[in-house]
Amino acid sequence: MGDKTLTRADLAEAVFRKIGLSRTESAQLVEMVLEEICSTIASGESVKISSFGSFLVRKKNERVGRNPKTGEEVPISPRRVAVFKPSNVLKDRILGAHGERLPRADRVEMLKAAE
């Protein structure tokens, strides 16, 4: 795996190069999109981006955890957490890029041919 992390600045630069907006406008656009996603998730709603994935809010109940160092039981309070669920398109694209799995359409054709 690569060490490269995609940053807000990288996204803004990509918008600048591909769309042709100024660097300032590109950065503002990226910030606006990310802010809309963040505020929607923070309000408890889901965000679904077609062919990419969904950002969901899950409620976790109170539970008992254990301090790994001492073994002491510690209560973990209930909370809401944000989770990301990739779409099947994204999963296939990731696995296909590493040669681990054929795209879904190709898998379906292979299964039909095998029948």
Image (cartoon, rainbow, N blue to C red):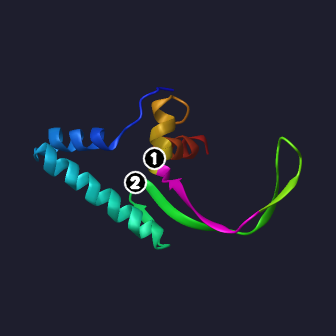
Dot 2 crowding, Cα within 10 Å, few <14, some 14–19, many 20+: few
- Cα separation between marks 2 and 1: 6 Å
> Element type at marker 1?
helix
Going by the numbered disc 1, the residue's amino acid type is Leu
Q: Which residue is mark 2?
A: 51
**Residue placed at 47% from the left, 72% from the top?**
45
Task: Say whether residue 23 is left or right of residue 112.
Answer: left
Vertical order, 58 against 51 (above or below): below
Q: On screen, 41 above or below 7?
A: below
The residue that appears at 22% across and 39% down in the rendered structure is 13
Which of the pair 87/2 is nearer the observer? 2
Nearest the viewer among 3 and 102 is 3
Neighbourhood count class around disc 1 (C-alpha, 10 Å): few under 14, some 14–19, many 20 upward: some
Magenta stretch mostly in which secondary structure?
strand
Residue 40's quadrant in the figure? Answer: bottom left
Taking 5 as reference, is 82 above or below it? below
| Residue extent of the magenta highlight | 76-88
Q: Amino acid at mark 2?
A: Ser
According to the picture, the residue beneath numbered tag 1 turns out to be 90
Q: x%, y% of residue 88?
A: 50, 51
- The C terminus lies in quadrant: top right
Cβ atoms under marks 2 and 1 closer than 8 Å = yes
In x, y percent, where is residue 32?
26, 59
Query: Residue 76 location in percent, x, y?
Result: 75, 62
Q: Is residue 68 left or right of residue 109?
A: right
Asked which secondary structure carries label 2, the reply is loop
Instruction: Estimate the x, y position of residue 21 in percent, counting from the top left.
Output: 11, 47
Q: Is residue 87 magenta?
A: yes
* Mark 2 vs 1, N-terminal side: 2
What's the residue at 45%, 46% (across, down)?
90
Is residue 43 located in the magenta-colored stretch of the structure?
Answer: no
Q: Is residue 72 above or below residue 59?
A: above
